[in-house]
Image (cartoon, grey):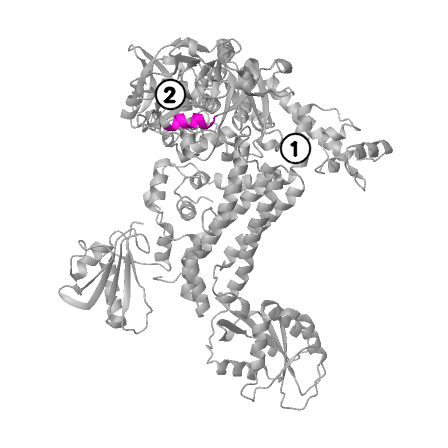
């Protein structure tokens, strides 16, 4: 008997299985196809705005995605480098062949983890408790917990024009009965849709007509432990190109033939990632739309045409692609398609990612209504951790909105539910100034150490870093800045006015125009780059960080106001009827969570607060 | 809202008609039980029906009943209004019957509270209902009505929309940094936009000062030595205008001795008993008390006697009154002139019929009452709204200041978002503890 069975070997499944194994659980990872473990069926990249921070958080908590991405990318960029530190994020072009390969290697090293092929069609359930799974062939496997990370495979349909094929991505099989069986148990099933663009044969592209997009010339890693394992000058290029009036005309002429506009699709597609026909219809006045060409793998002859996802029939896709500059003679190796799939209602999931209706069932990734490898991996990690913690008899790990993007992600899901596939955005994180790329380890590693996903060695390294941050701040405060002739000259050369009075280096750094890079021209502080970065951000943005922390502690107050599980909202007088219905359905754990439910007004919160005080003496 | 509430909606004095309002899911079925006439369960919405209120075969009153079905009603619930014409006893009797048949007596402001909870009114609008009920002058009534119809909320929403647009653009730049067809908001392009928004918030804030004058009136203190004629000036002003002499609490902790209207504004004369009762006016206590009265008043009329020299106490008093709210009135112009004062003053006496006209004129010019635009009544109208506007203004100022410090735009946006939240709070779109308890306790029964 296994402790945990993880169903699905995508990004959520890999993280869930690995972390549970790391926490000492006996784990079985079931996948439909061993070759598809950690497959990247859509874009060839890991990270991106906000998503890159999630990858850092996964790494800080002992997950795999960061390390594997570091080992398998051929281009890396720090996005928003010109903006503030709060919105910076790494994005890699990950090699579609290397990434899954490295992931499999990593999973094989996990001695508590067993991987097996099999298509799950049902769960073994007794008294609303999940006890294992039933395979397509009828074989039963029992376990204490089950984690479903089925991606798009639940009743998946591939749509190309009016063609509708029951199939998973890459013509894989699909699970025909699992979502129906979940529905019978009382779970609400929703239907979502996503899409992927064409793949183009490299040798058929005229790259000279496209603009080059290069990687950064600074070394970066997602991992807090690895050294960079790539060479800056060996990074691959991506290319930028645009649609034109001709493209738009073709799309308008054939609009009714697309699955979306022809009415062949029923699922709800993502707002932030519209198909090209959507873009043309919704932004009719735009004369062009931006597209990117990204290599899928240095071992493949295929390029990914980002921004051109569509559900048009194949012959229209040919015309559309050939209307693009540089792709006049392009050979399409894979046509774009839309895929529809079943997902469960996120409102029936607890913040621990355990199901509210079926005990010992956890879910993560697209089945919860999200989109994106990183969002999936982040949830997979938490599902794996919480299933393990439950079996260890411990409290679940629930990250707060001011602790991690992963916390924001899960809180949004279970509080607001999902109408279209959920993608993480920086604007969803009201505390993004605290949730930075650069401080993921400082935020989360201690938690990881406590639950056993971070090693002693990693923990000690973190303590050392903290100590160094403290030391450097101290040193800056204690070291007087003296304006010698030489230093005055350096100020002059850089067009910076020197300070008129004596001050410490700490104070000097508060000036907007002065940074460590400039100071290093005349004074060396011997500390690691990441230590200097922390201190610099803390000094430069002290005012804003303080504001954010104040807001966070305000939130903490109502976050601590627990709502008892047994509350009967019918007994709370004066609640607006919509609020009453939503509260009864979602059953928020804290007053803070209740405030974030749409349709629950401030007045309802006030009423609820008074009720809690009266009925439960909840201060 | 599960229960059905009822209350007498009209004033409880003897009148030709009283209206009893019933609101809630059982409004129709409860009233049907006691109404003899058309079957109210079958009539169309927003219609009026003649009939009788009948209990145990006894006709209580001849009535007209208005039937308004949810959601197009004041509370967004089913509402019935019973127009009775039997005077206060009959009206009370009908109310009792309704309570007996399953209605609950509405709490203070509960109809408006329901209108708010059911999304019929936003917060600023709900607050203006209270203002409307308590309006003492015509202009105050107009202001409340204007705000009730959402004019102030509209202004707030307009400014807020501008901020939303700015924020959305900043956000899209952050989340999609590689899309170079999208306009990039930089600190430079942001600055003029923020200044514009800040100006609009400041404009609303400036107007709100007028709103306080319109709503609560102008507090005027009359100060001076005993026997200079303060009481007779006050009495004369009050008598001339058939003043409403009341003992109701004024805007602050002061007691209003009486009020008159001037150019449509309510002028409240503040009791200065504290000063008058001090026997030895040269005493230090007297000055301290005067200071308090002077600080609280919008306008201070310092009364001197034409027939006496200015004492040192009077000179001290003049000094502590800020010039912009000081009127020196030299009384007893009919007596011999002995006064020695090199400040501007106006003269008059209370004996002649028009002796106080110049004083009134002076009040009007000093407060700029003629320039207050009564046509554009979109003002913030209470302390809560004004404080939030101020907070929004501060946050915007902070953002503008930080732009010059070269702070990255995503951090500037933190200040901008704060202003956006403050504005949202005015119309009730952000959660704030205990806000509503205070708010709804200010309402009187039945709208």
Q: Above or below — where is B189 with respect to B368?
A: above
The magenta segment is A243-252
User: Mark 1 falls on what kind of element?
Assistant: helix
Say if the magenta span includes residue A442: no
Distance between the Cα atoms at labels 1 and 2? 51 Å
User: Do the dots labelled 1 and 2 sit on one chain?
Assistant: yes
Residue A257 coordinates in the image, percent (x, y): 33, 24
* Residue A373 placement (x, y as % from top left): 47, 21
Label 1 crowd (10 A; few <14 / some 14-19 / many >=20): some
Q: Secondary structure at mark 2?
A: helix
Residue A556 visible from this viewpoint: no
Q: Label 2: few (<14), some or many (≥20) within 10 Å? A: some
What secondary structure do most residues of the magenta stretch adopt? helix
- Report the front residue among A275 and A602: A275
* Frontmost residue, B400 versus A550: B400
| On-image quarter of the C terminus of chain B | bottom left
Chain of the residue where label 1 is placed in the rendered structure? A
Q: Which residue is mark 1?
A: A537
**Residue that label 2 marks:** A316
The outermost residue toward the left is B57
| Residue A218: percent from left, percent from top | 65, 21
Q: Identify the residue shown where x is 64% and y is 41%.
A: A543
The answer to which of marks 1 and 2 sits earlier in the sequence is 2
Depth check: B249 or A81 in front? Answer: A81
The answer to which image quadrant residue B183 occupies is top right
Residue positioned 47% across, 61% down in the render: B377
Foreground mark, 1 or 2? 2
Q: Position of residue B163 (x, y in %)?
A: 52, 45
Q: Is A371 on the left-hand or right-hand side of B51? A: right
């Amino acid at each position: 008997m296994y402790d945990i069975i993880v169903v699905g070997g995508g990004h959520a499944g890999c993280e869930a299985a690995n972390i549970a194994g790391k926490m000492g659980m006996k784990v079985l990872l079931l996948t439909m196809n061993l070759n598809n473990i950690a497959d990247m069926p859509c874009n060839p990249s890991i990270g991106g705005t906000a998503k890159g921070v999630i990858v850092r958080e996964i790494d800080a908590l002992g997950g795999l995605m960061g390390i594997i991405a570091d080992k398998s990318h051929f281009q890396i960029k720090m996005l928003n480098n010109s903006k503030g530190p709060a919105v910076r994020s790494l994005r890699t072009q990950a090699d579609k062949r290397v990434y899954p390969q490295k992931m499999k290697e990593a999973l094989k090293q996990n001695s508590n983890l067993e991987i097996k092929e099999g298509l799950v069609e049902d769960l073994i359930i007794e008294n609303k408790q999940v006890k294992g799974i039933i395979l397509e062939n009828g074989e039963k496997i029992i376990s204490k917990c089950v984690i479903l990370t089925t991606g798009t495979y639940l009743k998946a349909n591939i749509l190309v024009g009016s063609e509708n094929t029951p199939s998973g991505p890459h013509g894989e099989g699909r699970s025909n009965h699992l979502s129906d069986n979940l529905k019978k148990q009382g779970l609400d099933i929703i239907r979502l849709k996503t899409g992927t663009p064409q793949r183009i044969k490299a040798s058929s592209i005229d790259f000279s007509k496209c603009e080059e997009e290069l990687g950064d010339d600074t070394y970066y890693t997602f991992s807090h432990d690895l050294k960079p394992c790539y060479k800056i000058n060996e990074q691959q290029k991506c290319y930028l190109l645009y649609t034109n009036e001709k493209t738009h005309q073709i799309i308008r002429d054939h609009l009714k033939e697309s699955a979306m506009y022809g009415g062949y699709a029923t699922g709800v597609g993502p707002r932030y990632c519209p198909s090209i026909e959507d873009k043309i219809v919704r932004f009719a006045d735009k004369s062009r739309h931006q597209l990117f060409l990204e290599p899928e793998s240095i071992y493949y002859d295929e390029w990914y045409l980002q921004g051109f996802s569509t559900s048009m029939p194949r012959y229209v896709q040919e015309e559309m692609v050939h209307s693009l500059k540089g792709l006049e003679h392009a050979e399409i190796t894979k046509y774009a398609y839309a895929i529809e799939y079943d997902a469960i209602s996120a409102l029936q999931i607890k913040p621990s990612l355990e199901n509210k209706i079926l005990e010992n069932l956890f879910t993560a990734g697209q089945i919860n209504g999200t989109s994106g490898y990183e969002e999936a991996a982040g949830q997979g990690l938490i599902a794996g951790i919480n299933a393990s913690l439950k079996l260890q008899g411990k409290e679940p790990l629930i990250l707060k909105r001011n602790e991690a993007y992963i916390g924001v992600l899960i809180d949004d899901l279970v509080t607001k539910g999902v109408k279209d596939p959920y993608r993480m955005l920086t604007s969803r994180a009201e505390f993004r100034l605290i949730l930075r790329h650069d401080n993921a380890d400082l935020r989360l590693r201690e938690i990881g150490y406590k639950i056993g996903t971070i090693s002693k060695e990693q923990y000690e390294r973190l303590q050392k870093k903290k100590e160094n941050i403290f030391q450097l701040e101290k040193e800056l405060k204690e070291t007087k800045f003296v304006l010698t002739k030489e230093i005055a000259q350096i100020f002059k050369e850089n067009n910076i006015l020197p300070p008129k009075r004596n001050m410490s280096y700490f104070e000097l750094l508060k000036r907007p125009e002065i940074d460590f890079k400039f100071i290093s021209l005349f004074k060396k502080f011997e500390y690691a780059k990441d230590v200097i970065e922390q201190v610099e951000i803390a000094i430069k943005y002290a005012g804003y960080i303080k504001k954010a922390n104040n807001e966070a502690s305000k939130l903490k107050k109502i976050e601590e106001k627990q709502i008892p599980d047994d509350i009967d909202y019918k007994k709370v007088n004066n609640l607006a009827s919509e609020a009453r219905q939503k509260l009864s359905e979602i059953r928020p754990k804290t007053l803070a969570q209740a405030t974030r439910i749409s349709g629950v007004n401030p007045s309802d919160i006030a009423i609820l607060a008074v009720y809690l005080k009266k009925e439960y003496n909840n201060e | 809202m599960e229960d059905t509430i009822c209350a007498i909606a009209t004033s409880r004095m003897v009148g030709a008609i009283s209206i009893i309002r019933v609101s809630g899911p059982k409004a129709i079925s409860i009233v049907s039980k006691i109404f003899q006439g058309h079957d109210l369960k079958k009539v169309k919405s927003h219609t009026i029906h003649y009939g009788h209120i009948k209990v145990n075969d006894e006709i209580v009153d001849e009535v007209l009943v208005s039937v308004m079905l949810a959601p197009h009603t004041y509370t967004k619930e089913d509402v019935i209004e019973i127009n009775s014409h039997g005077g206060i006893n009959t009206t009370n009797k009908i109310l009792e019957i309704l309570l007996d048949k399953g209605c609950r007596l509405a709490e203070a402001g509960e109809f408006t509270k329901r209108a708010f909870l059911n999304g019929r009114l936003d917060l600023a609008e709900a607050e203006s209902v209270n203002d409307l009920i308590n309006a003492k002058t015509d202009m105050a009534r107009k202001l409340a009505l204007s705000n009730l119809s959402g004019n102030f909320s509209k202004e707030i929403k307009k400014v807020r929309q501008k901020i939303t647009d700015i924020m959305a653009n900043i956000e899209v730049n952050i989340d999609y940094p590689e899309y170079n067809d999208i306009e990039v908001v930089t600190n430079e392009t942001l600055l003029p936009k923020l200044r514009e928004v800040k100006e609009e918030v400041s404009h609303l804030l400036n107007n709100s000062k007028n709103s306080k004058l319109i709503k609560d009136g102008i507090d005027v203190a009359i100060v001076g030595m005993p026997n200079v004629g303060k009481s007779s000036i006050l009495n004369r002003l009050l008598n001339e205008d058939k003043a409403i002499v009341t003992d109701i609490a004024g805007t602050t902790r002061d007691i209003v001795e009486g009020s008159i209207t001037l150019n449509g504004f309510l002028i409240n004369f503040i009791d200065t008993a504290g000063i008058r009762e001090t026997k030895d006016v040269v005493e230090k206590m007297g000055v301290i008390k005067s200071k308090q009265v002077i600080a609280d008043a919008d306008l201070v009329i310092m009364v001197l006697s034409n027939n006496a020299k200015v004492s040192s106490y009077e000179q001290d008093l003049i000094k502590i009154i800020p010039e912009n709210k000081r009127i020196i009135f030299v009384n007893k112009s009919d007596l011999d002139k002995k006064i020695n004062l090199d400040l501007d003053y106006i003269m008059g006496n209370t004996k002649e019929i028009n002796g106080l006209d110049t004083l009134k004129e002076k009040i009007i010019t000093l407060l700029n009452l003629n320039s207050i635009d009564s046509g554009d009544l979109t003002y913030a109208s209470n302390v809560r709204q004004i404080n939030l506007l101020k907070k929004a203004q501060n946050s915007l100022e902070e953002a503008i200041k930080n732009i010059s410090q070269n702070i990255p735009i995503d951090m500037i946006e933190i200040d901008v978002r704060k202003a956006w939240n403050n504005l949202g709070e005015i119309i009730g779109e952000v959660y704030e503890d205990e806000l509503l308890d205070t708010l709804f306790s200010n309402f009187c029964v039945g709208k």
